[in-house]
Amino acid sequence: MQTFFEYSPEVKQALIEHQPIVALESTLITHGLPDPLNCETAIAAENIVRENGAIPATIAIINGKIKIGLTTSDLEKLVNDPHVTKASVRDIPHILTKRSNAGTTVAATVFCADAAGLKIFATGGIGGVHRGDDQDISADLIELSKTPMAVICAGAKAILDLPKTLEFLETFSIPVIGYRTSSFPAFYTAETPYILNTHYDDIASLAAHLKIHWQLNLRSGLLIVNPIPMDAEIPTDVIEPAIKEALKNAIQKKIYGKEITPYLLSEVATVTKGKSIESNITLIKNNVRLGALLAKHIYTT
Ligand code: PSU
Ligand code: MN
């Protein structure tokens, strides 16, 4: 299996030396954020991980290889490819066959990071059960149900059906752990009425929980939810109409399958005049910082 994988020199070294590593995804680079903010955010996220004592491993598929850690030239290839696709788990063999480039979703990144022996992964938001169409369930949830990865995010995107997403997480035994919050955050907003039954206010307790989950050999992932910083929040009365408008347009334009999430995100960005993008970038940075602190704690204690 290893021949399908290529490690960046930095990640290779970190694995040999058992340094803390944080996996990062790449669909948010290829399909989540507009150019040039995508590239800038990818680089900034990696630097935040380094500044907080861990090594970043951004995962993507480049020229048909699963890259664990991107070099500058890999990142350039990814952002400059007009045909770059969004790869979920089932798409990986196709993209390897075609020797093409793809951003990996949370699901695909969880799969690749686990295969590479990584334990901690930070992103913006995960996919979930879609509003109005509960047959549309992101493969992110399915992969998390069977891979013991700790995924740090700012909740599920508010474009989703949050109560149904939480039900799914409960049914599939995926713990949802609040970091300094007792409610499930909704990506652009920090608080919701959905109360969590587990939360911690310090990294040591969070790390202890993760370790016990892994020592018990529980097979599910863990979802660590880290609310968006207060000053970057978008009030519900601003974001809700934007989401409703985007959902209406998606139905009218008959957008479906894996195109829906990128479409909704870009529509919400248009309606909020870019404010949603700023918030998205702030919460990504906030999550990768927590990912690095957590990884450092877990690898060194
Ligand atoms: N959250 C964001 N931006 C994104 C995504 C999530 O703020 O670009 C991406 C992630 O890669 C996630 C994917 O895994 O969207 C989910 O897509 P879908 O709903 O089609 O499963
Ligand atoms: Mn879907």
Image (cartoon, helix red, strand yellow):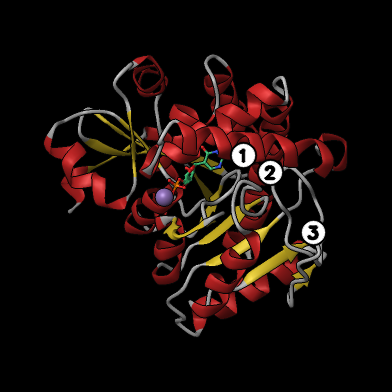
Calculate the distance from the C-alpha at mark 3 to the C-alpha at mark 2. Answer: 23 Å
Front one among 158 and 181: 158
Callout 3 crowding tier (Cα within 10 Å): few <14, some 14–19, many ≥20:
few
Residue type marked 2: Arg
Q: Which residue is mark 1?
A: 49
Residue farthest front in this picture = 252
> Going 42% across and 41% down the picture, which residue do you hit?
11
Do the CB atoms of the residues marked 2 and 1 lie less than 8 Å apart? yes
Residue 289 badge: 2
Residue 27 horizontal side relative to residue 124, left or right: left
Image point 59% across, 45% down: which residue?
54
Residue at the disc numbered 3: 192
Q: Is residue 248 above or below residue 171?
A: above
- As helix, strand or loop, the secondary structure at mark 2 comes to helix
Q: Nearer the viewer, residue 170 or 133?
A: 133
> Mark 3 vs mark 1: which is more N-terminal?
1
Position of residue 134 relative to residue 276, above or below, is below
Could you tell me which quadrant the N terminus lies in?
Answer: bottom left
Relative placement, left or right, of 1 versus 256 is left
Residue pictured at 40% horizontal, 30% vertical:
70
Foreground mark, 3 or 2?
Answer: 3
Mark 3 or 2, nearer chain start: 3
Disc 3 and disc 1: Cα gap in Å? 28 Å
